[in-house]
Image: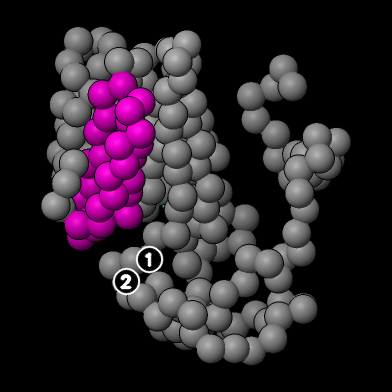
Amino acid sequence: SPHVMMIRDGAEVFAREHNVEMVPESYFFTESRWNALQRALEAQGRPMPQRPPGVAGGADEAAHEDDPEHKFGTVGAVALDRHGNIAAATSTGGMTAKRFGRVGDVPIIGGGTYANQQCGVSATGHGEFFIRNVVAYDICARMQYLGISLQQAADDVVMNRLVQQGGDGGIIALDARGNFAMPFNSAGMYRGRIDAAGRVTTAIFRDER
Ligand code: ASP
């Protein structure tokens, strides 16, 4: 498509036309996220919605998802190909107990996701802060305008600018030379990388960057 961004019905039609696999809403249901939602709504004195159709009760598969330290369920990827093209992608269920109609940073190009010829960024965290600060674009722009490294630009934004404002989260980023940065100001961030030689590294807490 010549377009950069499509939403709702039009996006679904486009996806179907391109044979993207479709699944029922119940596919996305997990008992642990449902329980987390229930607790968040109760705490805010808000009513609980109906269980979605086609979903049976069951055991809690992943208890740690209820832990406030693990409240972000976003998945992101940034890749550099052999021709020097950079791509970034981010997918999320958003934040627990968000308002109906709320749009987070993830689909906002430049907010939670961005790539140009020099740099690609995918973010996770408290989306409102990432939108206000246009975080993904800001990191790439700082690199370009200030002539600083990706790591420096990413640290300046995630570890300084966002921290000053109380914006929790982190990012994964790559530049055109294959340098990467994965700073986060939360307790942990599930992350991994693979380099051109096939070396894989994964980490959760502050043990590797
Ligand atoms: N950034 C996402 C949002 O605000 C949440 C997340 O990263 O889990 O919707």
Residues at marks 2 and 1 touching, judged by CB atoms closer than 8 Å: yes
- Amino acid type at circle 2 is Pro
Q: Which residue is mark 1?
A: 71
Where is 119 relative to 56, above or below? Answer: above
Q: Residue at x 64, y 89 (%)?
A: 57
Q: Position of residue 75 (x, y in %)?
A: 46, 50
Q: Which residues are magenta?
A: 178-205
Q: Quadrant of the N terminus?
A: top right
Q: Residue at x 77, y 53 (%)?
A: 22
Q: Does any portion of residue 194 appear in the rendered image?
A: yes
- The kind of secondary structure element at disc 2 is helix
- The kind of secondary structure element at disc 1 is loop
Kindly identify which numbered label has been placed on residue 160.
none
Where is 206 relative to 98, above or below? Answer: above
- Amino acid type at circle 1 is Lys
Q: Residue at x 32, y 54 (%)?
A: 190
As drawn, is 188 to the left or to the right of 39? Answer: left
Q: Quadrant of residue 200?
A: top left
Tell me if residue 193 is in the magenta stretch. yes
Is the magenta region chiefly helix, strand or loop? loop
Mark 2 C-beta closer than 8 Å to ligand 1: no
Disc 1 crowd rating (10 Å Cα; few below 14, some 14-19, many 20+) is some
Kindly identify which numbered label has been placed on residue 68.
2
Residue at the limit of the structure toward the front, as seen here: 197
Mark 1 C-beta closer than 8 Å to ligand 1: yes
Q: Position of residue 148 (x, y in %)?
A: 17, 16
Q: Does any portion of residue 141 appear in the rendered image?
A: no
Q: CA distance from mark 2 to mark 1?
A: 5 Å
Q: Quadrant of the C terminus?
A: top left
Q: Quadrant of residue 80?
A: top left
- Tell me, what colour scheme is on the image? one colour
